[in-house]
Amino acid sequence: ALWKASVPSASERLERMIERTSARYFIVLDLDELAGQPDLARALESYPVISKDDDHLVFDLGAPPAIGNDELAHDPVTR
């Protein structure tokens, strides 16, 4: 029988990346790509956005995650 490994969620992958690399920021340059990955958008929505305009978002991964970040309003792509 073949054994299937479970695929970690975007939130789990993000947390691992932060722990392994000590990443401070997550920069999105392709907002359509983020929109196509709702699991990643949900994982990022608890981090503050420190810069945004029509073609980028910068999340501060060094800030403690907060539930219900008002600035993102649960849809970082359209804000």
Image (cartoon, rainbow, N blue to C red):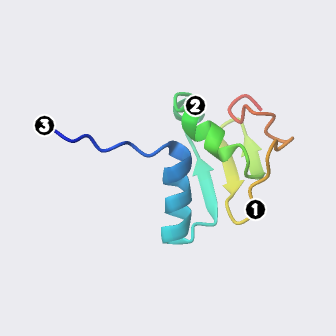
Q: Secondary structure at mark 3?
A: loop
Point out residue 3 in the picture as x, y percentages from the top left corner: 21, 42
Image quadrant in which you'd find residue 70: top right
Q: Residue at x 71, y 43 (%)?
A: 45
Mark nearer the viewer, 1 or 3: 3
Q: Is residue 47 left or right of residue 21?
A: right
Q: Residue at x 71, y 36 (%)?
A: 76
Q: Secondary structure at mark 2?
A: helix
Circle 2 residue:
38
Circle 3 residue:
1
In terms of sequence position, does the residue under pointer 1 or pointer 2 come before the other?
Answer: 2
Residue with the most extreme left position: 1
Of the residues shown, which amino acid type is indicated by label 2?
Answer: Pro
Residue 64 badge: 1
Q: Is residue 76 left or right of residue 29?
A: right
Residue nearer the viewer, 77 or 22 = 22
Point out residue 40 in the picture as x, y percentages from the top left corner: 56, 40
Q: Is residue 14 left or right of residue 8?
A: right
Q: Secondary structure at mark 1?
A: loop
Relative to 25, is 35 above or below? above
Of the residues shown, which amino acid type is indicated by label 1?
Answer: Pro
Of the residues shown, which amino acid type is indicated by label 3?
Answer: Ala
